[in-house]
Image: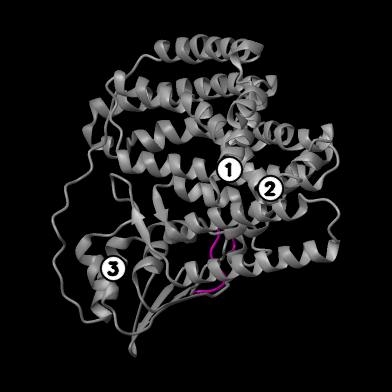
Amino acid sequence: MPWSDLRLLKLLFLQDLRSLLGYPSLWITLVMLSLLVGYSFVQAQDLFSQACRTALAYPELGSGLNPVEAVFVPTMGAYYLVETLLLPFVVIRLAGQDRQTGSLKLLLQLPLPPVMLNVAKLAALSVAGMLLALPALAAILIWHYLGGSVYGPELATLLLGHVLYTLAIFCIALFAATVSATPASAAIICLAVTLGSWVLDFAVSSGDWPAWLSRSSLTSLLRQFETGLLSSVDVILFLSISALFFYAGAIFLPTGRRLFDRLRGILGGMLVFGVIVWVAVQYPAYRDTTENRRHSFNPADERALKALPALLDISVHMNRDDSRLYDFERSVLSKLRRLVPQLRIRYVESTSQGLFGAPENDQYGLIEYDYEGRHDQSYSTSPREVLPLIHALAGQKLLPDPVPAYTGHPLVVDSAVSAWVFYVLLPFLFLYGAWLFRHPKLFLDVSGDLNHEDR
C-alpha cells in the first residue's frame, strides 16, 4: 500500500477514534461494566473465602480451590453480558454514522478499497477494547495485592477467549450496521445472532441436532476457554467467524452493486471458511493450561494412549441425559478423543426407570471396550479403573510418572478494597473520561492535520 494511502488510513482511524471516544454510549457501557465486574468479583471473593475457611481446617479439601476457576471465571461472566448485550450498540453507532450522515458516499470515493474503511473502524474499536480491559486488569491487580495466587497460562487462556469473543461481536455488529438502513435494524440482527447462538446451545444439549453444530455457537466456543483447555480448533473457529462477518460487511459496504455479485462474494467467503474449519478439525492441537491438570491424564498414560496403533472401540449403554454419562464424558472420553489416534465411540440408547428405579435393560450403564479382537467391559466411569482396563487390552504395562499433587490456593480475603475500586474509583474515572473526551479542544483536528500534510 502506498505511503499516501497509509496516511489517509491513519486519518480515517483518528476520525473514527474521535467519534468513538465522544459517544456517551461507550462510557455508559464502561461504567456498567465496572459495576457488573465489581459485583461479580466481590461475590466470587466472598464465596471463595467461605470455602477456604473450611479448607484451612481440613487441608485435604484444598485441591478443589482453584482461583482462576472459582474467582476469575465468574468475574469474567460480567464481560460476557456486556459484550453480548451492550457492546453491539457502541459498534453500530460508530459503523452506522457514515450511512446516516451521508458521508459514506464521499468515503467510498477515496483511493482506498472499501474494506479499509472497516479496518479503520476496527482499529478504533480496538482502543475501546483496551478501555474495556481496565476492570479485568484491576481485578487481577487487586487479587495479587491481597495475596492471591493466579496460574498465568490458565488465566491467559480465559482472557484470550474473551478477546476472541469480543472480536467476533465487533465484526458481527459491523456487518449488521453495514447491511441495515437504520441502527434499530442492525440491533435486531445482532440480537438475532445472539439468540440463535443460545438456541443452538439448547438444541444441541437436548439432542435434537447433531452435536457438531455446537462448534458454531459463540457461547460454546467461549466456554471451552473458560475450562482452561486451549484448542487450535476453537481459536481458528473464532477467527474464521470474525473474518467471515468482516468480509461480508466489506462486500455490502459499497452501494450500487448487484445483489447477485454480493451473494457470490459471500458464498466464496463461506467456502474458504469451510475449508479452513475442515483443515482445523482434521489437524487439531490441544494444550491443557490448568494448574491442576484437570484435562489431562498422567503423562505416562498419555504417552501410552498416543502410541496405540489400532482402533479402540467403546460402546456406551447409557442415555444422553444420564449424569453418569456426563461425568464419563468429562473425565474420560473427552481426553481419549484428544489422545487416541484411532477411536470410535458408540452410544447405545437404553431404557431406564429413572434415578431410583431399576433399569429395564440389564446392560444399562455398561461400557464395553474392544481392541484388536480383545473385549472387556465395566460399569465404572472413573479413569482409575478405565485406563488400566484399556492398557490391559492393548498389552501395555507402565508405571505412572510422579506428578506433584495439586493442593490448591486457599485464601481468605476482605472484599472491601474491591468494592471501593469497582463501585467508586473506576466509575468516576470513566465519567471523567466521558467529560474529558467530549471537550472539543482535546480532539485532534483532522482537517488541520490533513492541511498540514498537504503542505
- Residue at the image point whose x is 23% and y is 72% from the top: 304
Asked whether disc 2 touches disc 1, contact meaning CB atoms under 8 Å apart, the reply is yes
Where is residue 247 drawn, in percent x and y?
66, 55
In the rendered view, would you say 406 is above or below 27? below
Please say whether residue 355 is one of the residues in the magenta stretch.
Answer: yes
Category of crowding for the residue at label 2, using alpha-carbon neighbours closer than 10 angstroms: few (below 14), some (14–19), many (at least 20): few
Residue depth check, mark 3 versus mark 2: number of the one nearer the observer: 2
Magenta part of the chain:
353-362
- Residue at the image point whose x is 29% and y is 50% from the top: 293
The tag earlier along the polypeptide, 2 or 1, is 1
In the rendered view, would you say 350 is above or below 118? below
Which structural element holds mark 1?
helix
Residue 417, by quadrant, is top left
Residue 440, by quadrant, is top right
Which structural element holds mark 2?
loop
Q: CA distance from mark 1 to mark 3?
A: 64 Å
Where is residue 10 drawn, in percent x and y?
57, 36
Asked whether disc 3 touches disc 2, contact meaning CB atoms under 8 Å apart, the reply is no
The residue tagged 2 is 111
Residue depth check, mark 1 versus mark 3: number of the one nearer the observer: 1
Picture disc at residue 387? 3
In the rendered view, would you say 455 is above or below 214? above
The tag earlier along the polypeptide, 3 or 2, is 2
Which amino acid is tagged 2?
Answer: Pro
Q: Is residue 175 left or right of residue 55?
A: right
Which structural element holds mark 3?
helix
Category of crowding for the residue at label 1, using alpha-carbon neighbours closer than 10 angstroms: few (below 14), some (14–19), many (at least 20): few
